[in-house]
Image (cartoon, rainbow, N blue to C red):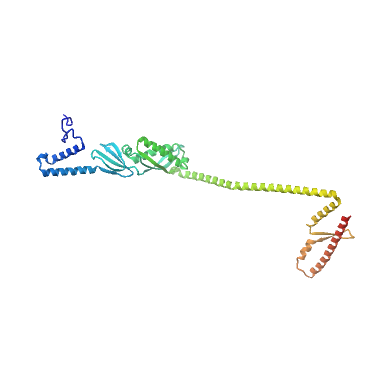
Amino acid sequence: MAWNEPGNKDPWGRNKNNSSLDGVFKDFKKTIDDLLGGKAGSTPPSSQKSAGFLSVIILVIYLLSGIYIVNDGERGVVLQFGGFNEITMPGPHWYPRFIQAVEIVDVSKIRSVQQKAVMLTEDENIVSISFAIQYDIKDASDFIFNLREPDTTVSQAGESAIREVMGQNTMDYIITEGRTGVAADTKKLLQSVLDSYGAGVNVQTLNILEAQPPEQVQDAFSDAIKAREDEQRYINEAEAYRNEIIPLARGEAKQMLEQAIAYRVKLINAAEGEASRFTQLYNEYKKAPDVTKERLYIEAVQSVLSNSSKVMIDIEGGNNLMYLPLDQLINNNKQPRNNNDLQKSDNETNIMDRINENKNNFNLRKRDLYNE
């Protein structure tokens, strides 16, 4: 018959009705007493007191050994007989030792792994890439039970995810402006893979530290990148020149248009003025044709001779005209004078007198013609 059947005692002397914690402690105390000195009736009182005191000390040590404290940013994973029982939050807690165990997990700590690999792109080119993953724990129980080596698992899953993303993009895109996009796509895919594993891991960031061609062809790709940068620089310079020259050209065109409008207005006003003057002159001509002709003739002669430095003198009683080079005479007056200059000055004075006399005669003749 088994020891745990009804009516039997177990090896520690416990009854079937002794199921409470106090009963367990009493049975534990009785077992200690039996080990130390047999039955309680056969031991001296002093020995019983010593055994009881020792039992209390052992009990206190057992109770104190089960106390643990979970700090902020940590979680306590309680295991009962090796299986998951519960997760305890920050604060003091107690667990029965030898029955349960506790593992403290820091869920606020940021863990990181870094790896470098050579991968194949969509256009069948090889790219050497270096990336770093930072992650924390979002489920402490999954992190403990489902991952044996968390850093290795995250690193290998990250390499697998980034290989898939790299195979969907070209090399030029990856090594130039596509790093941010590739990192974002890889992070999303990696988180999905880790969730499918039940890893209890949250990927914080995934950064691509370096993406470049292999060393064997790196010089050629550097030249190609430099040529592409030069092309972009020339395009930027051309656009800057265009942005500078187009406003200037538009300004000049606007200025020329305004000048043309002003010139048109000027010509129209001048033409209208000339037409009005001609109309007024024509009206005066109809009233006195001879006088108008004489006046027009005199005004024409005056406008022509006012800009000339030469004078023609009509000598009375002769058919010849005397020519006076006034420009040379004026230039001679500016030179230093000597005896010859004085004689010339007297001659010039006589000539000017004759010019004035002829001028007066011309005015008299003009007056007589006007009176006629």
In the displayed structure image, the side of residue 298 where residue 159 appears, left or right = left
Residue 291's place in the image compared with 169, above or below, is below
332 and 88: which one is in front? 88
Residue 248's place in the image compared with 308, above or below, is above
Q: Quadrant of the C terminus?
A: bottom right
In the displayed structure image, the side of residue 342 where residue 49 appears, left or right = left
Q: Quadrant of the N terminus?
A: top left
Residue sitting farthest toward the top: 1
45 and 342: which one is in front? 45
Q: Estimate the x, y position of residue 13 in percent, counting from the top left.
A: 15, 35
Residue sitting farthest toward the bottom: 339
Residue 160 in view: no
Residue, x 82% and y 66% (percent of image)? 349
Residue 241's place in the image compared with 169, above or below, is below
Residue 313 quadrant? bottom right
Residue 286 in view: yes
Residue 36 quadrant? top left
Residue sitting farthest toward the right: 317
Residue, x 76% and y 49% (percent of image)? 273
Q: Estimate the x, y position of residue 337 in percent, counting from the top left.
A: 77, 69
Q: How many marks?
A: 0
In the displayed structure image, the side of residue 40 where residue 241 appears, left or right = right
In the displayed structure image, the side of residue 11 where residue 205 appears, left or right = right
Q: Estimate the x, y position of residue 143 in percent, counting from the top left.
A: 33, 39
Q: Estimate the x, y position of residue 322 in percent, counting from the top left.
A: 84, 60
110 and 209: which one is in front? 110
